Image (spheres, rainbow, N blue to C red):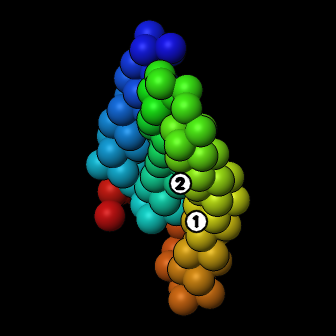
């Protein structure tokens, strides 16, 4: 169980790092938000799953309930994070934020 939790935790940290690189490297608001939304959602889910699995070492009723609560948070993040990212991009489009085109330099 510890090995699986460690692997999930390392993968989660890796995807957080990839999301940060995407925010720093991509040229405009929309691509940066895409990188942040996708990577942060996956990374948060992986880290929370690692915590839930690590918590099950004792396998008592209390640890099972805590792990179920963490899995509920995973479900909420899975639904809420992409929805929030979509709402932010739509608000930016309505506000007039122009997407980057190939001929332009970085903003």
Is residue 80 left or right of 15 when viewed as pictured? right
Give the secondary structure at mark 1.
Answer: helix
Q: Which residue is mark 2?
A: 37
Q: Is 74 located above or below residue 54 in the figure?
A: below
Name of the residue lying farthest toward the top: 3
Dot label at residue 23: none
State whether residue 53 appears in this view: no
Q: Is 40 located above or below residue 10 in the figure?
A: below
Tag count: 2
Towards the viewer: 88 or 9: 9
Q: Is 51 located above or below residue 26 in the figure?
A: above
N-terminal-most mark, 2 or 1: 2
**Which image quarter is the C terminus in?**
bottom left
- Give the residue drawn at x 47%, y 24%: 58
Residue 14: image location, x then y, percent: 38, 28
Give the secondary structure at mark 2.
Answer: helix
Residue 71: image location, x then y, percent: 62, 46
Name of the residue lying farthest toward the front: 61
Q: Which residue is mark 1?
A: 85
Name of the residue lying farthest toward the bottom: 95
- Give the residue drawn at x 64%, y 59%: 76
The answer to the question of whether label 2 and label 1 lie on touching residues, with beta carbons closer than 8 A, is yes
State whether residue 24 appears in this view: yes
- Give the residue drawn at x 50%, y 14%: 1
- Give the residue drawn at x 62%, y 87%: 94
């Amino acid at each position: 169980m510890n090995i699986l939790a460690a692997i999930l935790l390392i993968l989660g940290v890796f995807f957080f790092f990839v999301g940060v690189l995407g925010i720093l490297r991509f040229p405009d608001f929309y691509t940066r938000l895409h990188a942040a939304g996708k990577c942060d959602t996956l990374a948060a889910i992986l880290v929370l799953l690692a915590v839930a699995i690590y918590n099950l070492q004792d396998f008592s009723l209390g640890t099972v309930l805590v792990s179920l609560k963490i899995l509920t948070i995973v479900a909420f993040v899975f639904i809420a994070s992409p929805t929030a990212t979509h709402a932010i991009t739509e608000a930016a489009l309505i506000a007039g934020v122009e997407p980057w085109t190939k001929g332009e330099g970085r903003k």
